[in-house]
Amino acid sequence: MLIDTTVWIDWLRGQASATTDRLTRLLDEGDAVMAPVILQELLHGARSPQALTTLRASFSDLPMLIADVDTYADAGALYARCRWKGYTPRSPHDCLIAQLAIDNRLLLLHDDRDFEFIARIEPKLLCWRHSEE
């Protein structure tokens, strides 16, 4: 399962929720997946050089999804399709994350309303729901 930045942030802050509980189980089972764009977003929040080093090391063992040129192009097209339907995602990174999940046939674990809107426009985006347990 691909884990969005929003869930990682809540998990790192120790916030209990259905999504952070799911993330903990995924980590225990070795089923959590990272993407460079998510790592980048997480590192944006580092409060010191030491925190940056710790954060980077914390995610070094996770499987990493690497986007190719087609993934970036498809993410750009997804962003445009969202705009054409009257919804502009707050971040183009979300369309890249969504496209990575689609391309790799992974569920996306998130706590971000943008992905719910994106999934309405692109039904191939499969988002985890608490009721699926």
Image: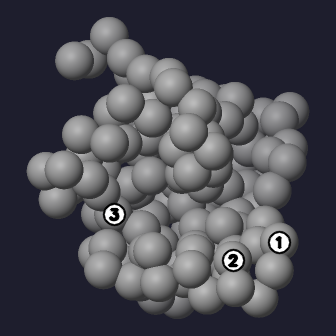
**Residue beneath disc 2:** 51
Residue 118 placed where, x, y %?
63, 39
Q: Nearer the viewer, mark 2 or mark 3?
A: 2
| Residue 118 in view here | no
Q: Residues at badges 2 and 1 in contact (C-beta under 8 Å)?
A: yes
Residue 133 lies in what quarter of the image? top left
Q: Residue furthest top?
A: 131
Q: Could you tell me the amino acid type at mark 1? A: Arg
SS for dot 1:
loop
> Is 117 rendered above or below residue 118?
above
SS for dot 3:
loop
The answer to which of marks 2 and 3 sits earlier in the sequence is 3
**Residue beneath disc 3:** 33
Q: Residues within 10 Å of mark 1 (few under 14, many from 20)?
A: few
**Residue beneath disc 1:** 47
The answer to which of marks 1 and 3 sits earlier in the sequence is 3
Q: Could you tell me the amino acid type at mark 2? A: Ala
SS for dot 2:
helix
Q: CA distance from mark 2 to mark 3?
A: 21 Å
Q: Residues within 10 Å of mark 2 (few under 14, many from 20)?
A: few
Q: Is residue 58 left or right of residue 120?
A: left
Q: Is residue 128 left or right of residue 133?
A: right
